[in-house]
Image (tube, rainbow, N blue to C red):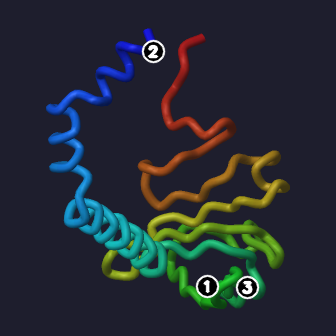
Amino acid sequence: MKEKIKAFFQNEKLKRFTKKVFNKKTITAAIIILVLAAGLRIAFSLMFEIEGTVNKVDGSKITVANFLTTKTVDIGNFQTTESSIQVGDRIEIMKNISGDVISVRDRSNRNMKEKGNSFDNDKHNIKGNGGSNFKRGK
């Protein structure tokens, strides 16, 4: 078996293939693509997702702090009550491209145990206990 493996790796076709695929140009291109993808993901997160701990609730404005920044978000006429989001809660706010709030998810343990983990403006977000959006048969 060792001889077969050794013969496989010493095969000229395999050596030419590896020289063709694993050269400086393709490795550099792969690294550039990975860096661009990571940069786009970070930019998306900074623009459309706000996740952290609630520092202040003032009417329809919520101040959220995470390890990078502190942001104040106006949730406007979003369908939540001021009593449902409290100071100290861990929340995730999703916004669309025009800056309107799509969903506010409460990630604190208190609300996940009591009533689920999401306040949704539409029906496309994960709701309820267990994180599933479909009905299971009994």
Q: Nearer the viewer, mark 3 or mark 2?
A: 2
Label 3, label 2: how far apart the Cα atoms are = 68 Å
Asked which secondary structure carries label 3, the reply is strand
Q: Quadrant of residue 84?
A: bottom right
Q: Amino acid at mark 2?
A: Lys
Mark closest to the chain's N terminus, 3 or 2: 2
Q: What is the x, y in percent for residue 13? A: 15, 32
Q: Nearer the viewer, mark 2 or mark 1?
A: 2
- Near-viewer residue (51 or 136): 51
Q: Which mark is residue 60?
A: 1
Label 2, label 1: how far apart the Cα atoms are = 70 Å
Q: Is residue 89 above or below residue 62?
A: above
Q: Amino acid at mark 1?
A: Ser
Q: Quadrant of the C terminus?
A: top right
The residue tagged 2 is 2
Q: Is residue 92 above or below residue 7?
A: below
Q: Quadrant of residue 108?
A: bottom right
Is 89 left, or right, of 50 in this rendering? right
Q: What is the x, y in percent for residue 63? A: 68, 87
Q: Which mark is residue 57?
A: 3
Q: Amino acid at mark 3?
A: Val
The structure residue drawn at horizontal position 62% and vertical position 55%, both measured from the top left corner, is 118
Asked which secondary structure carries label 2, the reply is helix
Q: What is the x, y in percent for residue 7? A: 31, 21
Q: Quadrant of residue 3?
A: top left
